[in-house]
Structures are given as structure tokens and as C-alpha cells.
Image (tube, rainbow, N blue to C red):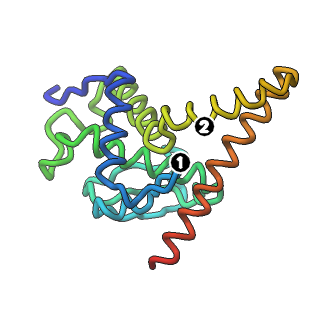
């Protein structure tokens, strides 16, 4: 096989996610990342299709400007956003694979070893998570609220539950503000 993918470390994936966010500063509002806008900025097109999901939620077509997704992913937008991010991350992580216009010998999905496939999918998923929810910002939001609630002397389980609710609401609010900003700029 002439194509080989080398697995990335968590630190490398966080650094790549940070580079992507810095490259698209206008596609960010607080904790929210406008993955649909990044997809657009990359010049990528979505091609929703029925019945893809039994194989995958999405994949890059032979033409790397097309991302094929199962239309059912849009029933739950947070999952759809993650799927879109994961496919963008495949392009970023496997840039050398897609930049030549044709797949190199041995790089077709069915030609990869099981280990190569696992590494690629794990890294694309981890990078998508890192891109959509920056660890440092998540930790800062979580830790700040957690310390505040701990100071009240509430039971630890209540502190944890309320902290998680707070972070989720901060993230949802950022997504709503981002959606409004995108709608207003259109």
C-alpha cells in the first residue's frame, strides 16, 4: 500500500483545531463555531442523500469538494454539525490524500488496513470535537461555575449537575447568537 496515515496525538489535534479557528476568526462567536460557514469558506458543497446512514453519516465524495451526508442527520442539528465538522476534519487531516485530485494507489477506503481506518476515523472525530468545543474555553467556563457553586456548600452532585447545565446553556446561547449573526449578515 502506498498511502499511510499516521495517527495524531491529542496535543497535535488541539493545535490543528486552534489553527482552523484562528484561520476563520469571523466563524466564531464565544464558544460557538460556525462549522457550516467554515465548510462554505473551504468551497465545499453538501450533498444530502437518503439511505447513506447505514454505511456512514457522511463521507467525502471522490471529488473532495463534495461532502455526502445522510439527510436524516439534519433531524438533530447538534449531531449534524458534528458530522459536518468531522468531514471537514477528514479533509484537513488527509490533505495530502485529497490535494492531488485523484486518490493514490492503496488509499481507497476498502484498501486501507483496519488499523489505518481506525486511526483516521478516531482522529477526524477527535479533531471535530476539539474544533467545535475548545478544551481550554470549555474548562474555563466549567471550572469557573464549578468553583462558584462549590462555594455555596451545596452537595457535590448538585454542584456538578448545575455546572453541566450552565456550560450547556452558555454553549446553546453562543450558538443562538451565532445563528442570529449569520442570519443578519445574509
- Label 1 sits on residue: 31
- The numbered dot on residue 82 is none
- Label 2 sits on residue: 141
Q: Would residue 60 be found to the left or right of residue 57 on screen?
A: left
Q: Would residue 145 be found to the left or right of residue 127 on screen?
A: right
Of tags 2 and 1, which is closer to the observer? Answer: 2
Q: Measured from the top left, where is residue 179 in percent x and y?
A: 55, 66
Q: Quadrant of residue 44?
A: bottom left
Height in image: 78 above or below 45? above
Decide which of 112, 159 is in the foreground and name it.
159
Height in image: 78 above or below 139? below
| Label 1 residue SS | loop
Q: Would residue 161 be found to the left or right of residue 176 on screen?
A: right
Question: Looking at the image, which residue is at 40% across and 49% down?
Answer: 59
Decide which of 120, 105 is in the foreground and name it.
120
Height in image: 55 above or below 140? below
Q: Earlier in the sequence, mark 2 or mark 1?
A: 1
> Are the residues tagged 2 and 1 within 8 Å (C-beta)?
yes
Question: Looking at the image, which residue is at 65% across and 48% down?
Answer: 170
| Neighbour tally class for label 1: few under 14, some 14-19, many 20 plus, Cα within 10 Å | some
Amino acid at each position: 500500500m502506498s498511502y499511510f496515515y499516521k495517527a495524531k496525538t491529542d496535543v497535535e489535534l488541539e493545535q490543528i483545531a486552534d489553527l482552523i479557528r484562528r484561520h476563520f476568526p469571523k466563524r466564531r462567536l464565544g464558544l460557538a463555531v460556525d462549522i457550516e460557514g467554515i465548510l462554505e469558506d473551504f468551497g465545499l458543497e453538501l450533498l444530502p442523500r437518503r439511505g447513506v446512514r447505514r454505511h456512514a453519516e457522511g463521507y467525502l465524495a471522490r471529488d473532495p469538494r463534495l461532502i455526502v451526508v445522510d439527510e436524516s442527520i439534519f433531524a438533530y442539528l447538534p449531531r449534524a454539525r458534528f458530522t459536518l465538522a468531522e468531514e471537514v476534519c477528514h479533509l484537513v487531516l488527509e490533505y495530502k490524500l485529497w490535494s492531488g485530485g485523484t486518490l493514490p494507489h492503496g488509499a481507497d477506503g476498502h484498501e486501507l488496513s483496519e488499523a489505518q481506518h481506525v486511526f483516521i476515523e478516531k482522529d477526524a472525530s477527535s479533531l471535530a470535537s476539539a474544533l467545535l468545543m475548545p478544551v481550554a474555553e470549555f474548562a474555563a467556563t466549567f471550572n469557573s461555575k464549578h468553583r462558584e457553586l462549590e462555594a455555596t456548600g451545596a452537595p457535590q452532585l448538585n454542584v456538578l449537575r448545575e455546572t453541566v447545565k450552565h456550560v450547556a446553556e452558555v454553549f446553546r446561547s453562543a450558538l443562538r447568537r451565532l445563528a442570529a449573526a449569520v442570519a443578519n449578515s445574509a
